[in-house]
Image: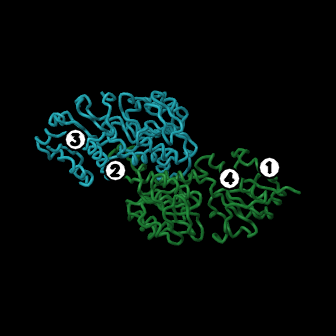
Chain colours: A green, B cyan
């Protein structure tokens, strides 16, 4: 039997041991070095994004294994329904959850505020800090990132509310709110962490009223996708509520610099989309390893994990 | 029997319920509003600091219950040996440990670095971040703050080394190092958290060689006392090792502004001594409550907690 062809588009710096297991199950070719015939025969593509052109030169594609947890950036209408798309949820949940906690604590303890002041020689104490222990956090999105955030929040002695599509029981979640009751989840909360995918249900889910449901000196952290929050509503809310903090690693525009208006606000804390793959090469290598393990499940005829429901996007 | 006199020097904003239990056991007077006779009869003083003059007007003092965890700021030679001094260890361990984690994560995830850059409109990614999970942290000082830090570090999936005066078994500590083997504790560590008191044993404990024992891109967090670290050695080390980060809430000089040379270094992260009492009034009120509970033990003839060994200071 002819071996199936798997095309990897993963970056040259990734060490072979991250995908070497694939060699036991398939013919592995590298995007950019693959011949037209190899591409024509390709059944699986491992990549961050798949273009219309990719799909034309790979007409026999059956599986696109995306390297990122989010798949909102794909050109969904161009992807035939015969192609299964899998996201890579869980592949970088630990570093991204750590980044969410870093942003939350930076806001709670006013680290960026005081470090900038002290750096300029001003050591006066003009802002009070927040204690996490005994406070209440709403975790929106209970995939691997949100669940890890909930676990860490619980270890810090916080009361944890969870928000997800469908009600479910989870460890570390004290109270559950199901879609569409996002206002219930946020109501009176000290902290919120957004770890939601960006899709038809979540785009613009957080608007002015939802922000206003939280405590006036609340902290909202976003490590999911910018578009879950309405940008005009957020800017208005942050201008009107100087005690509120929005701490984010994610943005609206493909070019972050187009969102520099947010970064300039005194009550925003901003990192340039580094929680996951762009934070450390090792995190990216782990993401490749995780993606490859799902492709091996496919090649062995086992059940795929993280199959995306295209109706969420098309 | 005449009731004992307890003098409180705790700040007017502290609500009565923080110390109301004392009324059942003693005559309570407020420093500044107490008569000379009341001061003369005073047996207990609850305060941040006790001066030579205080001791002269309160000749019958038997117990000074300090509000802070550290007692290095006291004028020890002026305190008669007949006066027992208790520190307030544990009274703010949770917020201070949270602050330590905030500083550690700000350094690991480069939050202050990237926030400042993004604020100026530069969204390029020039620094990699560190993943806490699987990394190694040395916790120096295993009082209530250090133990809480160890617990949180363990929840984050870190390997935890402990350093304290005498070997002991503790939960959350994977490997123990006893005084004076501070270099062993720091050797090859990714992170270190200093939660040590400042006394005769610890002053200048961390010098150039100790800093150099850690990884070159290591992170040292200090929430104990500045003087535990040699300032000239630290400045030299930070200048020579731009990838190393020193993140601190504590300083050397009584006036923090005299330590502005540290805050100006690009690889320092600085907050102006806000982890505990100066972070939030509620934290301070909790410190008063905790101190008062020990005074009540004294008044009831029960064993005192947190008795300071004056030979550590004189």
Using the numbered discs, state the Cα–Cα distance from disc 1 to disc 4 in whole angstroms: 16 Å
Using the numbered discs, state the Cα–Cα distance from disc 2 to disc 4 in whole angstroms: 43 Å
Label 3 SS: strand
Q: Pointer 1 indicates a residue of which chain?
A: A
Left or right, residue A234 beside residue B71: right
Using the numbered discs, state the Cα–Cα distance from disc 3 to disc 4 in whole angstroms: 61 Å
Looking at marks 1 and 4 on the same chain, the residue that comes earlier in the sequence is marked by 1
Residue in view at x 52 percent, y 48 percent = B155
Label 4 SS: helix
Left or right, residue B242 beside residue A28: left
The residue beneath circle 2 is B283
Which label was assigned to residue B45?
3
Q: Pointer 4 indicates a residue of which chain?
A: A
Depicted A189 relative to depicted B200: above or below: below
Residue in view at x 66 percent, y 57 percent = A88
In the current view of this chain or complex, which residue is farthest to the front? B1
Which is in the foreground here, disc 2 or disc 3? Answer: 3
Q: Pointer 2 indicates a residue of which chain?
A: B
Residue in view at x 46 percent, y 70 percent = A183
Using the numbered discs, state the Cα–Cα distance from disc 1 to disc 2 in whole angstroms: 58 Å
Residues at marks 2 and 4, common chain?
A: no
Closest to the observer: B250 or B185? B185
The x, y position of residue A14, in whole percent, is 69, 46
Closest to the observer: B189 or A242? B189
């Amino acid at each position: 039997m002819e071996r199936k062809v798997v095309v990897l588009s993963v970056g040259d710096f990734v060490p072979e041991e991250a995908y070497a297991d694939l060699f036991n199950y398939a013919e592995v070719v590298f995007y950019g070095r693959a011949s037209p015939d190899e591409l024509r025969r390709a059944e699986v593509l491992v990549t961050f994004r798949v273009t219309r052109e990719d799909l034309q030169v790979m007409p026999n594609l059956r599986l696109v294994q995306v390297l990122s947890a989010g798949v909102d950036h794909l050109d969904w209408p161009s992807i035939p329904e015969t192609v299964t798309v899998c996201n890579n949820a869980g592949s970088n949940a630990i570093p991204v959850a750590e980044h969410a906690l870093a942003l939350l604590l930076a806001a709670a303890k006013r680290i960026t505020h005081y470090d900038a002041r002290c750096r300029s020689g001003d050591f006066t104490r003009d802002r009070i800090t927040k204690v996490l222990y005994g406070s209440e956090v709403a975790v929106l999105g209970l995939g691997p990132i949100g669940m890890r955030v909930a676990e860490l929040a619980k270890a810090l002695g916080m009361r944890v509310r969870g928000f997800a599509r469908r009600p479910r029981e989870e460890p570390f979640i004290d109270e559950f709110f199901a879609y569409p009751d996002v206002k219930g989840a946020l109501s009176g909360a000290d902290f919120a962490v957004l770890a939601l995918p960006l899709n038809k249900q979540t785009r613009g889910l957080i608007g002015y009223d939802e922000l206003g449901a939280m405590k006036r000196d609340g902290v909202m952290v976003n490590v999911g996708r910018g578009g879950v929050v309405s940008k005009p509503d957020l800017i208005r809310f942050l201008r009107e509520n100087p005690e509120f903090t929005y701490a984010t690693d994610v943005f609206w525009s493909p070019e972050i610099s187009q969102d520099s208006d947010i970064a300039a606000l005194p009550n925003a804390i901003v990192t340039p989309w580094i929680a996951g793959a762009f934070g450390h090469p090792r995190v990216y290598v782990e993401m490749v390893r995780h993606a490859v393990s799902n492709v091996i499940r496919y090649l062995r005829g086992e059940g795929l994990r993280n199959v995306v429901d295209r109706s969420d996007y098309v």
